Image (spheres, rainbow, N blue to C red):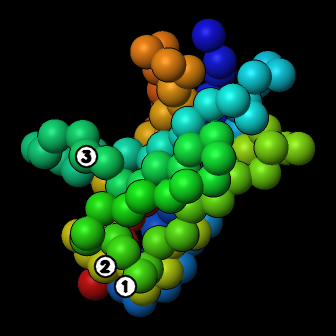
């Protein structure tokens, strides 16, 4: 099972930007479909964005045009560039890796957007 470590979270003012990173262990990263999810207090975990092993991307409607997902297979890393942040983006952000039916999760990184 792949190990995932997120970083890059923090406190930012509304309208600001952050870039999250998720570093994966092992040599199978390039075969994985990767994703970012988030969970706000009192809410269910929700999909933010995904990128397949063929670089096809998908975004939640709430982040389209503001967030960009990308991956660097040479570095075993997936990124989430978050621009024009809003208070409603405040959540713990989790990285996810899928190999077929097998999924792995990171420990999460807190993103707090102050208004």
Left or right of residue 113: residue 30: right
Residue 52 is left or right of residue 45, and the answer is right
The percent position of residue 79, horizontal first and vertical second, equals 64, 56
Mark 2 or mark 3, whichever is nearer to me? 3
Q: Is residue 68 above or below residue 9?
A: below
In the visual, does 85 lie left or right of 28? left
Crowd tier of the residue under label 1, counting other residues whose Cα lies within 10 Å: few below 14, some 14–19, many 20 or above: some
Q: Is residue 76 visible?
A: yes
Q: Which mark is residue 14?
A: 1
Label 1 secondary element? loop
Judge the density around disc 3: few (<14), some (14-19), many (≥20) Cα neighbours within 10 Å. Answer: some
- Residue of label 2: 86
**Residue 14 x %, y %:** 37, 85
Q: Secondary structure at mark 3?
A: strand
**Quarter of the figure that contains the C terminus:** bottom left
Q: Closer to the camera, 16 or 75?
A: 75
Q: Which residue is mark 3?
A: 46
| Quarter holding residue 37 | top left
The CA distance from mark 3 to mark 1 is 21 Å
What number is the disc on residue 77? Answer: none
3D distance between C-alphas at marks 2 and 1: 5 Å
Looking at the rendered image, the quarter that the N terminus falls into is top right
Q: Is the residue 83 above or below the residue 90 in the image?
A: below
In this view, which residue lies farthest toward the left? Answer: 42
Which is more N-terminal, label 3 or label 2?
Answer: 3
Q: Label 2: few (<14), some or many (≥20) within 10 Å?
A: some
Q: Earlier in the sequence, mark 2 or mark 1?
A: 1
- For image coordinates 42% across by 58% down, the residue present is 58
């Amino acid at each position: 099972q792949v190990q995932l470590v997120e970083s890059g979270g923090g406190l930012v003012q509304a309208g600001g930007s952050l870039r999250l990173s998720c570093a994966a262990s092992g040599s199978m990263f390039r075969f994985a479909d990767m994703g970012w999810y988030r969970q706000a207090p009192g809410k269910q975990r929700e999909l933010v964005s995904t990128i397949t092993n063929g670089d096809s991307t998908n975004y939640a409607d709430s982040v389209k045009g503001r967030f960009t997902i990308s991956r660097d297979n040479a570095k075993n890393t997936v990124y989430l560039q978050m621009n024009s942040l809003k208070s409603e983006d405040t959540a713990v952000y989790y990285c996810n890796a899928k190999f077929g039916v097998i999924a792995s999760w990171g420990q999460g990184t807190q993103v707090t957007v102050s208004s």
